[in-house]
């Protein structure tokens, strides 16, 4: 996965992507409850990502994509509308 325009600030980033670019890394963790009623429970760690380390940034972006896919599936399963 190459870093394309969609991963450059101002080119299609959402709030979750922006957190990543601020230096946080999403640690894949499912919600502790069986429902997303209170919102997903993300566990963030302060692993700094140097923007010059392309491989590290790409890995983190892949984790964000996986987390988004999981929560979209959960919302659909629970009959909730997608944001």
Image (spheres, rainbow, N blue to C red):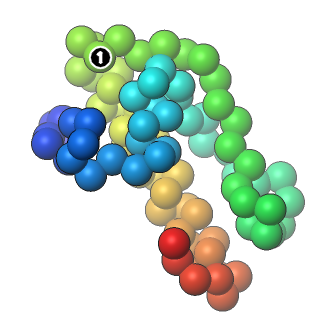
Task: Determine which residue is flagged by label 1.
Answer: 51
Q: Position of residue 28 (x, y in %)?
A: 60, 42
Residue 1: quarter of image: top left
Q: Position of residue 53 (x, y in %)?
A: 27, 14
Q: Position of residue 75 (x, y in %)?
A: 62, 75
Q: Residues within 10 Å of mark 1 (few under 14, many from 20)?
A: few
- Residue positioned most to the bottom: 79
Element marked by disc 1? loop
29 and 18: which is toward the camera: 18
- Which residue shows up at 47% across the image and 46% down it? 15
Q: Is residue 57 above or below residue 9?
A: above
21 and 47: which is toward the camera: 21
Number of disc labels: 1
- Which residue shows up at 24% across the image and 42% down it? 10
- Which residue shows up at 22% across the image and 36% down it? 8
- Residue positioned most to the right: 33
Residue 76: quarter of image: bottom right
Q: Is residue 45 above or below residue 3?
A: above
| Horizontal side of residue 7 vs 83, given as left or right | left
Q: Is residue 48 above or below residue 38?
A: above
Residue 77: quarter of image: bottom right
- Which residue shows up at 45% across the image and 24% down it? 22
| Horizontal side of residue 6 vs 49, given as left or right | left
- Residue positioned most to the front: 10
């Amino acid at each position: 996965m190459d870093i394309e325009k969609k991963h450059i600030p101002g080119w299609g980033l959402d709030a979750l992507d922006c957190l990543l670019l601020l230096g946080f890394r999403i640690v894949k963790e499912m919600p502790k409850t069986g429902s997303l009623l209170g919102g997903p429970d993300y566990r963030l760690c302060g692993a700094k990502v140097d923007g010059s380390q392309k491989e590290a940034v790409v890995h983190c972006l892949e984790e964000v994509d996986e987390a988004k896919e999981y929560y979209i599936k959960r919302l659909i399963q629970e009959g909730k509308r997608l944001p």
